[in-house]
Image (cartoon, rainbow, N blue to C red):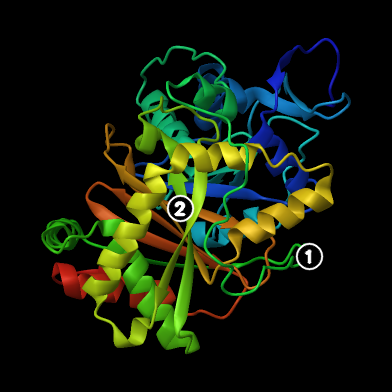
Amino acid sequence: MRHSPAHPIVRPLGAFEHVIDLYISRNPVQFSLVVELASPVSAHRLERALAQLQRTHPLLAVGIDRSGDRPAFRESTEPIGVRHVSGVDWREAAAQEQTRPVDADGSPLARATLVGDAPDGRGSAVVLTFSHQITDGRGALRAAHDLLAILDARTLPARPVPLDQESLLERLPGTERPTDHTPGPPAEPAVATVRPFDAAAPSIETAELDPATTAHLRSTARANGSTVQGAICAAAAQALSALTGAESIRVNVPVDLRSALDLEDDVVNRFTATAVVLRAPAQSTLWSLAKDATAQLRAARAGARQAALMLGSLEPADASQAEAAMLAATAADLEITNLGTSEPDSSSAVAIWGPTMTTQVRDERILGVVTHAGSLRLVLTTHGDTRGLPADVAGRLARLGGSGAEG
């Protein structure tokens, strides 16, 4: 169904949402979270749970109306679609999600794939896919948690429409609109270029650490003046340097504003990004690199509010300008999107993986990280040849945190 005046406008897109939407109008950007279920669920039961999830989170029940001067989220009454596939691994299903662009003019801007032979098979998983205008990875994790709660027969209240990022940040005390763009770190390597969308499925590769190793890694990182995220950046830099021979590794890291600024955990975009540059990873110890990465990430978190407002002040006139701005901001050898710790409040999920994602940037490598039920899990999505990279990163982390890496 296309938009109709009978369906009310929810709210205009915010400035950063508009930048993302302009970029997506030329280059599909959607991402998935994968929830491995403890027991099978039928497609009908999943559809009912998703309908309730849409009543809980307003941006899961919208399309984008671009007919006016400013694009807006317009209310939709259509349900989140569920596709049921069997005889495939969830990795294959998640890769296929990257071959089917979400129709931004249609609605809603989320969909689901049920993987497995439910209701009597084993290995059931739900692949939740979101177009990037409506949420980021952490918001998608909130949606996944709430879906599990609904599947556990809990009733969740309807939430208000979340404000756009800039309007929310401007309401915080001490916020000033940026007047000048402060340049970030120099682009290393050169500004990225687009890989024209051709519906080719990316490769998806995984690795994980068991709970004991993950716990030991966390305590060891703390004792060495690092965070787990810093250690992941360091291990990835060493692994990628060994693979490519690069003497300097640039890692693009989204910064979650919810944790940085103590914001509400809504299904919406609440992020900015920073670049962590680690030089001579092959000649450095992992902990020295980890401490360097941790210091860079802490500085980025301290400046997250202003960085987010600067992103919102770009105001590109068209899709070409949005594309140029996004490519300049995301030039990197690797992106690490760490959704943090997902404390299970439900026994319905065995594991959560993601995000799996492509942004149509040439030679991109996106490493999604989630720690769920005590286990740190890595999933790499790429069109390039980086076979074995997640296992290498996990192995380096495991040697720091004990043993127990699994590929």
Mark on residue 354?
2
| Residue type marked 1 | Asp
Which quadrant of the view contains residue 357?
A: bottom right
Task: Report the residue at 63% width, 73% height from top.
Answer: 363
Instruction: Say left or right for 257 vs 344.
Output: right
Label 1: element kind: loop
Q: Is residue 229 shown to the viewer in this render? A: yes
Return the residue at label 1. Answer: 198
- Eyeballing the image, is 318 above or below 109? below
Residue 297 in percent (x, y) is at 36, 54
Q: Is residue 82 shown to the viewer in this render? A: no
Instruction: Say left or right for 171 vs 24.
Output: left
Of 214 and 298, nearer the camera is 298
Task: Report the residue at 50% width, 28% height from top.
Answer: 45
Which quadrant of the view contains residue 27?
A: bottom right
Instruction: Say left or right for 341 vs 264.
Output: left
Q: Residues within 10 Å of mark 2 (few under 14, many from 20)?
A: many
- Eyeballing the image, is 220 above or below 102? below
Label 2: element kind: strand
Q: Quadrant of the N terminus?
A: top right
Q: Quadrant of the C terminus?
A: bottom left
Residue 159 in percent (x, y) is at 49, 15
Of 148 and 87, nearer the camera is 148
Q: Residues within 10 Å of mark 1 (few under 14, many from 20)?
A: few
Q: Of callouts 1 and 2, which one flags the residue occurring earlier in the amino acid sequence? A: 1
Which quadrant of the view contains residue 404?
A: bottom left
**Cβ–Cβ under 8 Å for marks 1 and 2:** no
Task: Report the residue at 72% width, 36% height from top.
Answer: 18
| Residue type marked 2 | Gly
